[in-house]
Each structure stands twice: as structure tokens, then as C-alpha cells.
Image (cartoon, rainbow, N blue to C red):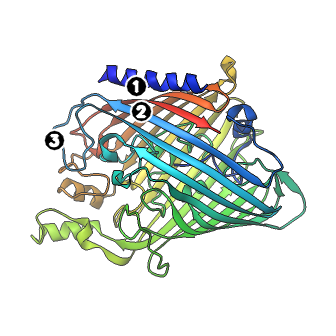
Amino acid sequence: MRLRFLIIGAALFWQCAGLAQSPSPSVDSQPPAEQQMDDPQTRMFEHSATSPWWVSGQINVIGQGHTAFPAEYSGEHSFRSTSEFDVSNVLTLYTAYEFNNSFEGILDVESAGGHGLSAALGLAGFVNLDVVRSPDLGQTPYLARLMLHKVFRLGKGDVESERGPLSIFTEMPAKRLEIRVGKFSMVDFFDLNAVGSDSHLQFLNWTVDNNGAYDYAANTRGYTWGAIATYLSPRWAVRYAFGMMPKVANGSNLDANLFRANGQNLEVEYRGGLLPHRDGFVRLLSYLNTANMGNYQDSIDQYKAGEVSTPDITATRRQGRHKYGFGLNVEQIVAKPVRVFTRLGWNDGHNESFAYTEVDRTAGFGFDVWGGLWKRQLDKVGVAYVINGLSATHREYLALGGLGFVLGDGALNYGREQIFETYYTLHVWRGLYFSPLLQYIWNPGYNRDRGPVLVPGLRMHIEF
């Protein structure tokens, strides 16, 4: 298996030499240190700074595998304990048109294919953010984003803005209100972190790149329809979003009845930093989801009353149930080439995990270092550690043999899931990058009776 992994990795690298699910953070929260990625040398083709049109794209190919690991038992939704290897790929075409200096439209088309390890099951912090959780969807291209973006001036003065997939304005009011309406991913704009939010050039784990306890409104591909309002000033930002929830947990179809089901999100951002004369961000997040959710305690009670042979969360679903949660997200430049971040997350854990993953509590931290220290200006290395947990009823439900949409070993000797991740992003030429990756997971799926497991990987990324 190791030989197979090395051969496929070498093939990917050879393809790179022959050539030579989320874009970078949005412009309203992108820190200065990240802006070097907009240098023409970081893309295959240079983009106009004045054209009203924008066309760009990306290709992300990830190979991951693992050898056999200890497991006393396995269930229907377990991470496979036998050796395996899979390759995923995501291709995105970004387009935009600037109608005037305060109004633009964005349309992105995407294709997500290949497979994730164990069909993306068995880990709350799954090892590849690019993997679609319903492999039967196939690689047929689909509409990822379709947005109208309007900017309202609220004061004097302007600031420069870097053109990118989510906005092509080159200048915007320093104090403004932004309205976006259409199809998007909540994590295009909420819970962003310049150190850990981008599976194209940074970490890959679901709960490193995002707050695992943030069960944000989305279909199985990670997108929703809705609206976002953002107030921005030089020091503060406040954003609120209202979006559609899926009809069922991890479902492809969204519920268009917003009176019956919706996701509400509020984030306050301080653009200051915790160290003197060092840039940083502090973000406080809250969310409230309303949907046709099942309840863990009701499922347990049904089982103990003998009404079902195995707890089944889907049998207790009821319209109008809620899930709410909170998050803290901090990023800080500590020296010119070094940035650190931390995330904390909590949700009530009573009703079923519905849209993102099965995490009710999370804490993570990490850092990255730019390659200028070793004369590789566009290289980067990152290290992160995250620990995930479940509410008492959620863990009891799984221990009694219940299935979530991600987890289900048939039994559970509960222990917090812990994940270590590291990567090195090598800039090969213009928009071509190559990254060796490594993840180590203790208590996969919160189960002390399984693991640990080591997951190495290789990533080829092209920006054009």
C-alpha cells in the first residue's frame, strides 16, 4: 500500500512538472500578510486590474491513504481499519462582472469528483475538506455560487481592495455596508481564518479549516441560498446571514420555506490584534438553525422503551426544532513570517447534527510560517492540533448503536477525538503548488476502541 501511495504521488508530481470546496478568504476580512498570494507569480495567468470582467479558476487534486490500524469492532459508518487509498479532485471556474464601482455579479461553476477515504465516514474531523459526503452525486458540474453584491458608502475615505473570486472591486469605502444575495457558502464569509480556512494551500481537516461545532446552513456540497449583510469600518465588522437549511440531515435539497426552516448567523469582528503593532483579528460567532431535526434523547427513550431495535435519529424528526451554537476565532501575526490561530466552538448538542459534521465542542490552535525564512518566499509550512467532543446524549446515542450522518461504529467507548495536522506547500512555478500532508488521529469517531490512525497525503494545486 505504501508503494502504491508513493507511485501515485510521484505521478502527480510528474504531471505538475510537465504542466510546469472553498476560494481564499473574502476581501472584507483578508489580512495583509495573505495578500502576497495575489501576486501575478502565484497564478498561471495574469489578471487585468481594470477590466469589468473576471475569469479565473483552480484545480485541487488530493491523494490520501492509510495502513491498517487497530479496531476492536467496526460499524456501518466506521472509518475503515483496513488499508485504503483514494484521490479527490475539485475544479472551479470563477467568473464575475463589475456593473459599476459599487455593484457586481458573481457566478462560479464547480465539479467535485473522486472519492474520500471510507466514503467520508467515521471521523468527526474528516481528513479532506474537498470530499463530497454523498459520493453518488458524481462529478457532473454544478452551480456553486451565484451572487449579486452591492456596496453602500457610509463615510468618507476609501481603501484598496484586492481582486479575487468573491469580489473584483479594486477600491471600496473604508466605512460601508455590503449586501450579498444569492447562492454561496456560509464559510466564504463566516468563521474565516487566514491561517486555517483554505484546503487549496493550507490544512485539509474539516475541523481545522472550519469550526467543527459550527453546523452552518448548507446542502451536502456546502452551499445554500440566502442573503448576507455586512457592516465594515477600519476597526470593526458585523455580518448577519439568513440562509436555507437542507430538508434532511446532509441532504442535497434545500428547504425553500424559510418560515419553516432557516439558518441565522451573526458574527462580530475586531480588526486589531492582541499584540502591539501586530495585525490580527478576533471574531465572535453565533448561529441558530431551525429545521426538521431529530432529537438524541427522544431516540434513546424510544430504544429503551422497546419501540425500536436500534436508536434511530431519523424516526424522531420534527419540524421547527432548533440548534444553536457559538464560536471564537482569533488570528495573530506574532512576527513577520509567523501567524498563529485558535478556534473554540460549542453547540447545544440536543438535536441532531444536520449540515456540517458531528461535533458539539471543539478547540484548536495552530500556526504557519512563510518560506522567506529559508529564501522560498511563496512556500509555507503549517502545524495544527484540534480536539473535538460530543454532548452527553449524542455520545449515548452512538454508544447504543445509533447512526449519525457521519458516525456510527455500532458501539462507543467514548474519548475525545484528537487530530494533529501538518503540511508543506511548495510553490513550483507561477500558479502550480505541490504539498505533502500528514494527519494523525487519536480516538477516530470518538472511540477509544479504534485507532490511532496515520493519514499521509499529497496535494497538487493549480491557480489560473
**Residue position for label 2:** 63
Cβ atoms under marks 2 and 1 closer than 8 Å: yes
* Distance in Å between CA atoms under marks 3 and 1: 30 Å
Quarter-of-image position of residue 40: top right
Three-letter amino acid code at the position of disc 3: Tyr
Could you say which disc has been placed on residue 73 in the image?
A: 3
Residue 313: x percent and y percent?
25, 66
* Distance in Å between CA atoms under marks 3 and 2: 26 Å
Seen at 19% across and 48% down, the residue is 75
Three-letter amino acid code at the position of disc 1: Ile
**Relative to residue 345, is residue 67 drawn left or right?**
left
Q: Earlier in the sequence, mark 3 or mark 1?
A: 1
* Distance in Å between CA atoms under marks 2 and 1: 8 Å
Residue 223: x percent and y percent?
51, 60
Three-letter amino acid code at the position of disc 2: Gly
Could you say which disc has been placed on residue 8 in the image?
A: 1
In this rendering, the label closer to the viewer, 3 or 2: 2
Q: From what the image shows, is residue 385 above or below residue 152?
A: above
Q: Earlier in the sequence, mark 2 or mark 1?
A: 1
Cβ atoms under marks 3 and 1 closer than 8 Å: no
- Residue at the right extreme, as displayed: 156
Q: Residues within 10 Å of mark 2 (few under 14, many from 20)?
A: many
In this rendering, the label closer to the viewer, 2 or 1: 1
Seen at 69% across and 39% down, the residue is 34
Quarter-of-image position of residue 150: bottom right
Residue 166 at least partly seen: no
Circle 2 sits in a helix, a strand or a loop, which is it?
Answer: strand
